[in-house]
Image (cartoon, helix red, strand yellow):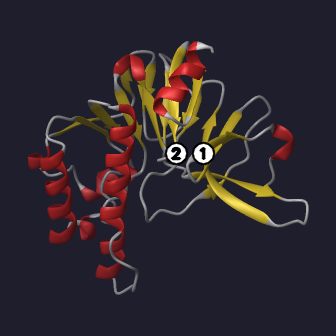
Amino acid sequence: MSDLAEAAAAVGGRVIEVAGEALHLLPERAAYWPDGDLLLVADAHFGKAASFRAQGVPVPGGTTGETLARLDAAVARCGARRVAFLGDFLHSRQGRVPGTLEALAAWRARQAALELLLVRGNHDARAGDPPGSLGVRVESEPHPVGPWLLCHEPGPRVGGYVLAGHIHPAMRLTGRANESLRLPCFWFGAGSAVLPAFGAFTGTAVVDPAAGDRVWVVAGERVLEVPGRQRRR
């Protein structure tokens, strides 16, 4: 068994090599860099549902708890001691309601040993930084960590391979009977990768990868590569 296969068997998901480094693509829609003991999460959008309800839009509750439960599952799966949020931690100022902030505080109390980093995204600029009591270190993009440039906005930059979010990427897969299914995906290009949106209440955007790009979709507990011939918009 190869080293990458052994790593995949140990942690779950799919292990790939990018910029000379192993990355675990997890079914929780996050990525783990074992050499840096770093879990990478894009677009949590905490408080998005609350923000909609504040504007009179009747959307269901419980999405913050669902997102935090998935975050717990990702941390448990890989044993990470560090988490980097690639932008859009909070959705908006209207979403900073007591219920959301209390849920985040309770989660932080359970995960007090984690080192947390946020690379600001466009929603963070409007929502404001996380409460200081959460102990989240906040940086602007691009933020270098090892061979990576941690960003919110995707696209190649000088100085490292970009890991980003923002787009909420998905692929539409079409069956033989022309039925289709949209699945969140990890999208890796020549100098930049886009992680799927992590939050429970986030939409997706179907992307159109270029020739040579590699794409993995999240299908339940499985992370599956999509060959170029199977890609459909």
User: Which of the labelled discs sits on residue 222, or is there none?
Assistant: 1
> Up-down: is 14 above or below 45?
above
User: Toward the viewer: 172 or 9?
Assistant: 9
Q: Residue at x 72, y 62 (%)?
A: 181
x, y percentage for residue 115? 21, 32
Q: Is residue 32 visible?
A: yes
User: Toward the viewer: 115 or 47?
Assistant: 115
Amino acid type, residue under disc 1 in the picture: Arg
x, y percentage for residue 31? 47, 35
Q: Residue at x 32, y 31 (%)?
A: 80
Extreme residue in the left direction: 133
In the picture, measured across the screen, residue 192 lies left or right of residue 136, that is right
Q: Which residue is mark 2?
A: 27
x, y percentage for residue 1? 63, 15
N-terminal of the two: label 1 or label 2?
Answer: 2
User: Toward the viewer: 66 or 54?
Assistant: 66
Q: Quadrant of the C terminus?
A: bottom right
In the picture, measured across the screen, residue 114 lies left or right of residue 25, that is left
> Up-down: is 186 above or below 233?
above
Amino acid type, residue under disc 2 in the picture: Pro
Q: Secondary structure at mark 1?
A: strand
Whether pointer 1 and pointer 2 mark residues with C-beta atoms closer than 8 Å, the reply is: yes
In the picture, measured across the screen, residue 183 lies left or right of residue 27, that is right
In the picture, measured across the screen, residue 206 lies left or right of residue 60, that is right
Q: Secondary structure at mark 2?
A: loop
x, y percentage for residue 91? 34, 60
User: Which of the labelled discs sits on residue 164, or is there none?
Assistant: none
